[in-house]
């Protein structure tokens, strides 16, 4: 059988698209297969945000943010990239102490950040509740319309995008739902939460999230507003949780998040969860209650046990490379993920130490080392 | 018969007329202008699609779910 391309990528979400972009830039012929299913890239908030739950997450998100700022200069207007900064909101003295600790960590990494007291926060975002104690501003964070960014990344003469569903992976070949087999030296699995179907041994769990968007109210909010309670309420909980996340879209709409639950993979909006999420956001921005919402929807994050992605060759399936498990941060970490994967593929020194993201940490070492 | 002001022009309609119908009777049928400058009009007619957002007496409402009232000011061209 003839080679269909140098590399086949399964999944044209933001991760598959970033990998394709980087490989094509190096002159490889890339075939990207996508089944057109409900994708996290289409559902998500597209908040480009530095997170520091652990050093590996900080390294990957900080590196990726720099790459987005570079790409941001070339991206077309419909990608809606803005470097509007994040405000981490402290609701009480305890959270203000968390903000100060976070400030130290991020400053040590050379990130542009600043602590705001209650008055400075009111001046920066007058719509916020006056009971807040202050905030940490992270200036390099941004926002993006990820579906269009993925399309932009795929626009390259060396990239062919084909609508097709992969139903089986066998060594360096894939079988499509019409029965055809395609082969390449390297396969990259980047199909998000669906990766479990083709590779059942992957330790991925779906984490459902709700989002809501309002009508246009330009000028009310400037930064992306995230509660600091997020660090404790959303990240470390195993039960359903919500955290206030209010993002001003360039259209003047407000995108409201976020909820997290492991107990449901159904696409339906669940009113009790949506209500809980909105009440939380209204606690932080009381005026939100008087605005009109126009749509609510859900999406699934692909969560690995440690919250970090799996980036590298499958230890027991040579030729199959993994780029999955990006949880709630995959739009942010797409450029770094692509660079890490491509560096390993080319046997080069990666821009970040790759160890924390290697699939081996869950899948064990190579069968025939 | 209620009389409203549609984009500044007076318009008499029958009792029970929705704002969506009034837009068609007295205007271009559209309720608003999108970010990209396109005129937008009622689509589903049953309060679901959110296309017919319109300003009535300074409030955003769905034109298809709102009945015309005497003296109402309807703005479709902000
Ligand atoms: C509610 C919510 C909010 C989020 N907010 C943010 C945020 O603010 N910031 C951030 O950085 N991240 C956020 N995320 C996470 C981010 O959206 C994801 O991590 C990222 O989009 C994952 O991209 P992906 O390309 O891996 O997967 P996906 O976008 O899910 O793409 C997978 C693709 O694979 C295709 N596919 C599936 N199966 C097959 C098959 N068998 N054959 C061929 N193709 C197949 C699908 O059609 C799909 O296009 C959020 C996620 C959710 C759900």
Image (cartoon, coloured by chain):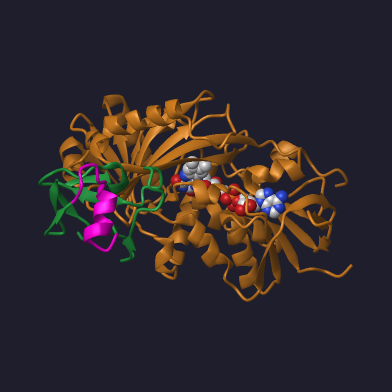
Which residue is located at x 84 percent, y 56 percent? A179
Which residue is located at x 59 percent, y 54 percent? A15
The image shows residue A41 at horizontal and vertical percentages of: 53, 51
Image position of A10 with respect to B70: above or below: below
Answer left or right for A139 relative to A19. Answer: left
The image shows residue B20 at horizontal and vertical percentages of: 29, 51
Which residue is located at x 35 percent, y 57 percent? A83
Q: Is residue B26 magenta?
A: yes
Between A273 and A67, which is closer to the camera in this rendering? A273
Question: What colour has chain B?
Answer: green
The image shows residue B23 at horizontal and vertical percentages of: 25, 56
Answer left or right for A20 relative to A59. Answer: right
Image: magenta residue range: B13-29
| Corner quadrant of residue A278 | top left
Q: Is residue B33 magenta?
A: no
Between B15 and A106, which is closer to the camera in this rendering? B15
Q: Is residue A329 visible?
A: no
Which residue is located at x 58 percent, y 26 percent? A263
Tell me, by letter, which chain the rendering colours orange.
A
| Corner quadrant of residue B8 | bottom left
């Amino acid at each position: 059988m003839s080679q269909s391309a140098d590399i086949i990528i399964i999944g044209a979400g933001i991760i598959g698209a970033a990998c394709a972009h980087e490989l094509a830039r190096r002159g490889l012929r890339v075939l990207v297969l996508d089944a057109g299913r409900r994708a996290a890239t289409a559902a998500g908030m597209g908040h480009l945000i530095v997170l520091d739950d652990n050093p590996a997450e900080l390294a990957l998100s900080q590196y990726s943010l720099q790459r987005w700022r570079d790409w941001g200069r070339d991206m077309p207007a419909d990608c809606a990239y803005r470097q509007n900064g994040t405000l981490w909101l402290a609701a009480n003295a305890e959270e203000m102490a968390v903000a100060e600790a976070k400030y130290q960590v991020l400053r040590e990494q050379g990130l542009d950040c600043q602590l705001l007291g209650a008055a400075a926060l009111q001046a920066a975002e007058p719509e916020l509740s006056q009971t807040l104690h202050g905030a940490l501003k992270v200036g390099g964070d941004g926002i993006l319309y990820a579906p269009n960014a993925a399309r932009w990344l795929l626009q390259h003469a060396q990239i062919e995008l084909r609508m097709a569903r992969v139903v089986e992976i066998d060594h360096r070949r894939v079988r499509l739902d019409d029965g055809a087999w395609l082969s390449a030296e390297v396969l990259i699995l980047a199909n998000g939460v669906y990766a479990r179907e083709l590779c059942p041994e992957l330790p991925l769990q779906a984490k459902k999230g709700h989002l809501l968007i309002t009508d246009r109210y330009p000028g009310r909010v400037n930064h992306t507003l995230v509660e600091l309670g997020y660090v404790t309420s959303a990240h470390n909980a195993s039960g359903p949780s919500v955290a206030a996340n209010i993002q001003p879209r360039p259209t003047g709409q407000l995108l409201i998040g976020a909820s997290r639950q492991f107990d449901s993979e159904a696409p339906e909006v669940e009113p009790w969860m949506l209500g809980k999420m909105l009440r939380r956001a209204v606690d932080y921005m009381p005026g939100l209650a008087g605005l009109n919402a126009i749509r609510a929807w859900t999406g699934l994050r692909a969560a690995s046990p440690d919250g970090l992605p799996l980036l590298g060759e499958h230890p027991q399936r040579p030729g199959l490379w993994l780029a999955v498990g990006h949880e709630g941060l995959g739009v942010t970490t797409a450029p770094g993920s692509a660079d890490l994967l491509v560096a390993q593929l080319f046997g080069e020194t990666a821009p970040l130490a790759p160890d924390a993201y290697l699939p081996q940490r869950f899948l064990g070492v190579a069968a025939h080392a | 018969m209620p009389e409203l002001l549609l984009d500044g022009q007076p318009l008499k309609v029958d009792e029970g007329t929705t704002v969506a119908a009034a837009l068609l009777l007295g205007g271009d049928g559209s309720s608003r202008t999108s970010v990209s400058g396109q005129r937008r009009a009622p689509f589903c007619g049953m309060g679901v699609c959110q296309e017919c957002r319109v300003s009535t007496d300074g409030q955003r409402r769905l034109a298809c779910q709102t009945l015309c009232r005497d003296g109402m000011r309807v703005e479709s061209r902000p």
